[in-house]
Image (tube, helix red, strand yellow):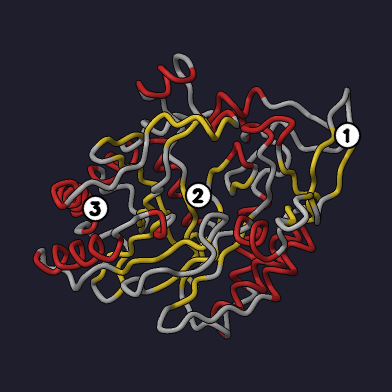
Amino acid sequence: MKLITFYLPQFHAIPENDEWWGKGFTEWTNTTKAKTLFNGQDQPREPYNDNYYNLLDDGTKKWQIDLAKKYGIYGFCYYHYWFNGKMVLQKPLEQVLENKDLDLPFCVSWANEPWTRSWDGKTSEVLLSQKYGDKGDWLNHFNYLLQFFKDDRYIKIDNKPVLVIYKVESIPNHQELFEYWIEKAKENGLEGLYIVETLNGLQKKEVSNLSEAVIQFEPNYTIHHDRPVIDKVKNKLKNLSMIPSKGKFIYKTMDYDITWKRILKRNMEVKDKKVYLGAFIDWDNTARKGDKALVFNGATPKKFQKYLGQQIKRGKEVHGSDFLFINAWNEWAEGTYLEPDKKNGFAYLEAVKEALKQNVK
């Protein structure tokens, strides 16, 4: 089983973020401001040895890659942002392309959502709208991605580069777009594209007959579709514990074990498509959403090891898949990351290593 972790590149300053949130804004800006909202909450989340890194430093990327390989992570899936030719946060992956010493397999997930103020919880305020353009933009986008597709480190299946799409159903003409990209890939010596749809809080099921696989993106899929926190009929919260705390606020928490048991119980089959299972480490997005956050209760490295081991086994035996996607390598502001921190050290990475070990025959 090859474990791939989603990778957030927002750990370096860019002009757009400087303008929208203040000079020098990165993901660390939010995590360092996070406060403990109720007794027992693990906030703020602090990196081991105060390693508030800058992803424009190749030494940092080499450290991440060496760590990933040491503990059994096969590859990174980098979030990619494209807004009708406008890009943000592209430099870390471009630097990976230029530096062959950064030798971990990788692929790309096109995060095709509008760029909003979600970094500080204001998701309704759009800063960069997501438009899909015409064939001219499709060609520009493909040509940009092609340099990565052709790299020996890029993850391919049958000489088809794996391209993950965050929300296919948001692309009004996705069929025509995918057909065009597949044709262009073949013109450039590839066998096509291995398009993977992300099933998450936004998209519940596959929508394209040109995709070859789906990913269960956790815990978002379960939160929204399998153990939803909102009863849409009665318009009220469910499956949550409400914790009273300082002042007037009441905070929402969800049970880690119950959520993982729902994930492990699910048996999803998609006709003519491979199903790639998902895993998550923990969840607490206080750093982004403050008192509107959703916090999971009960996560520990030992539990994660157990659940990940079971999920790896299910992926192999039930779905016959050789990839499993973990959320995430470094989503610090959402509280789901494998990188070492002050509380747990390297324990979650050790959990990955042990989960893989228990599935070796």
- How far is disc 1 from disc 2 in space, using C-alphas? 32 Å
Does the residue at mark 1 contact the one at mark 2 (Cβ under 8 Å)?
no
Between residue 44 and residue 290, name the one nearer to us. Answer: 290
Residue 35's quadrant in the figure?
top right
Q: Amino acid at mark 2?
A: Leu
Which residue is under mark 3? 148
- Residue 170 drawn above or below residue 273: above
Which residue is under mark 1? 39
Q: Which callout, 1 or 2, points to the residue nearer the camera?
A: 1
Quadrant (top left/top right/bottom left/bottom right) for the C terminus: bottom right
Between residue 92 and residue 110, name the one nearer to us. Answer: 110
Q: Is residue 286 left or right of residue 322?
A: right
Q: Residue 138 at what x, y percent from top left?
A: 19, 51
Q: Residue at x 31, y 69 (%)?
A: 194
Secondary structure of residue under mark 3: helix
Task: Indicate which disc, 3 or 1, sits on the residue closer to the N terminus.
Answer: 1
Q: Residue 327 at what x, y percent from top left?
A: 56, 54
Q: Residue at x 42, y 64 (%)?
A: 197
Total of numbered circles in the picture? Answer: 3
Task: Indicate which disc, 1 or 2, sits on the residue closer to the N terminus.
Answer: 1
- Residue farthest to the left? 187
Residue 181's quadrant in the figure?
bottom left
Q: Is residue 199 left or right of residue 104?
A: right
